Image: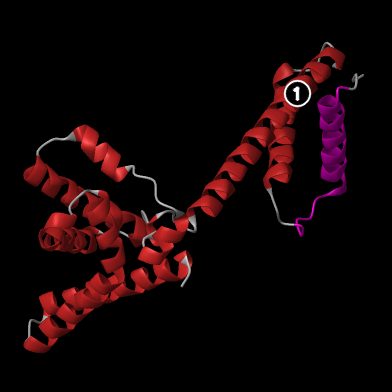
Amino acid sequence: MTMSDKSDALERAVTELIEARTALDTAPSPRASTRADRAFARLAALLAPRIRYFTRAYGLADVAEDAAQAAAIGVHRAAERYDPRRARFTTYVNWQIRAELQALRLRRHGDQRSAGRRAVGAPLSLDALIEAGADAWLADPAAETAAEASAADWLATRAADRLTDDWAARRQRALLRGAPAATAPGRLLERVAAERTLIRHQLKTTDAGTRLSESDRHIVRRALADMACRFGGAKLN
């Protein structure tokens, strides 16, 4: 089972648990209680390899039973507070389990910060993590793709804004410089603002079916050619 498969399985299990608990709260009954208990047991079984790994990593192998109980509290809390809009459950539950185990280590062994850092940071091979079933917590499989897409969108937006602003400033100077003395500057500024909006939309849109008038297409072609020359370092007239 891949990390993505494990993450998806956890999402299904926690969703089932949340639904079972909601049904129990709405209409308490022995059957609803049994359903909630079984849902939690399935979720705990999926997390068991991860809990064993964290138990060893935090130096709690000598109190494994207490660590299992502490981790179960963390799982309960994670399921109660989980918001799928903010994070994947595989990521959120890790923090809850680790917080409970850290608290247990503090109660059992005192501060021991340096020892704790050595325990948590002890190097393990990826093969060992996979064998232990702990590889699912290493990364959210969707996080890298989402982060790269967000960064690309942000950079594209910034680039489009800078290109458009630079073009509009040069366009405004050219119009004001070449306008007859009787021409009202306000009208020219309004014209540049309208053209800037048009160009910015064309740089931003991904709709290939957008239809422009002939005059708007002419403005867009000239502006894009001007930007290309500017970007390439050519001298503009």
Label 1: state its secondary structure.
helix
Q: Height in image: 134 above or below 119?
A: below
62 horizontally vs 210: left or right? left
187 or 154: which is nearer to us? 154
x and y percentages locating residue 91 in the rendered image: 35, 55
x and y percentages locating residue 220 in the rendered image: 82, 40
x and y percentages locating residue 166 in the rendered image: 73, 24
Residue drawn at x 81%, y 30% is 227
Q: Residue furthest bottom?
A: 31
Answer whether residue 187 is visible to the viewer in this image: no
Determine the image quadrant of residue 120. Answer: top left
Quarter of the image where the C terminus is located: top right
Q: Height in image: 72 above or below 173?
A: below
Task: Give the residue type that dot 1 points to.
Answer: Leu
Answer whether residue 104 is visible to the viewer in this image: yes
Q: Height in image: 175 above or below 181?
A: below
Q: Which residues are magenta?
A: 208-233
Label total for image: 1
Q: Residue furthest front?
A: 62
| Callout 1 crowding tier (Cα within 10 Å): few <14, some 14–19, many ≥20 | some
Q: Main secondary structure of the magenta part?
A: helix
Residue drawn at x 7%, y 44% is 107
x and y percentages locating residue 5 in the rendered image: 45, 71
171 horizontally vs 23: left or right? right
- Residue that carries the numbered disc 1 in the rendered image: 188
Residue drawn at x 58%, y 49% is 149
